[in-house]
Amino acid sequence: MFSFLNAHKYLSLPIMDLEALSKRLGTVKDSLKETEITMKRVSETLKDSDLPENERLVARDEFFDHLQDYEQAYETANEDYQKEISGLSEAYLSLCPLYEGPNLPKTTFLDSSQDIKELYGFFMMAGIFSLFGSHIPTN
């Protein structure tokens, strides 16, 4: 009679060592992550090199494939900014109020004091809720 406990006899499949398989998958995952980081660095170097225009565009597209959407938007804006200021002298740029330096600054959530106040407010509300929120009657 067939039973699931004896199924391996009928299927003639070797029983796998799941722990060894898990370790192997972890090794492959780490190797893949290292390779992706290397590919990102290489494509970034190539996109800024003196290659012909079509090869640089291919390298740029490859580099963008490794970025998040917000990083792609920043890189595009930064490239446009650098093209705009490339023909201007440093003396002229130093007098321009819109000049941000050779690269656009990367914006973060905590760029203004208002952003910091909103973050502190969020933490205070979360703290108050954690103190009193768990005692709300459910009737």
Image (cartoon, helix red, strand yellow):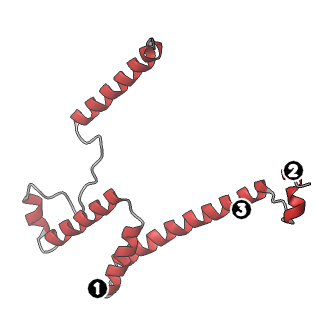
Q: Residue at x 15, y 69 (%)?
A: 85
Q: Earlier in the sequence, mark 1 or mark 3?
A: 3
Q: Name the front one of labels 1 and 3.
A: 3
**Is mark 1 in CB contact (under 8 Å) with mark 2?**
no
In this rendering, the answer to whether 66 lies above or below 106 is: below
Q: Which residue is mark 3?
A: 24
Circle 1: element type = helix
Circle 3: element type = helix
Q: Amino acid at mark 2?
A: Leu
Circle 2: element type = helix
Q: CA distance from mark 1 to mark 3?
A: 41 Å
Report which quarter residue 69 is drawn in: bottom left
Q: Residue furthest front?
A: 1
Q: Is residue 114 left or right of residue 124?
A: left
Q: How busy is the neighbourhood of tag 2: few (under 14 within 10 Å), some, or many (20 plus)?
A: few
Q: Earlier in the sequence, mark 1 or mark 2?
A: 2
Q: Residue at x 18, y 72 (%)?
A: 83
Q: Amino acid at mark 1?
A: Glu
Q: Is residue 75 left or right of residue 132?
A: left
Q: Nearer the viewer, residue 12 or 120?
A: 12
Q: Is residue 122 left or right of residue 43?
A: left
- Image disc number at residue 5: 2
Q: Amino acid at mark 3?
A: Arg
Q: Which residue is mark 1?
A: 53
In this rendering, the answer to whether 108 lies above or below 60 is: above
Report which quarter residue 70 is drawn in: bottom left
Q: Residue at x 87, y 66 (%)?
A: 12
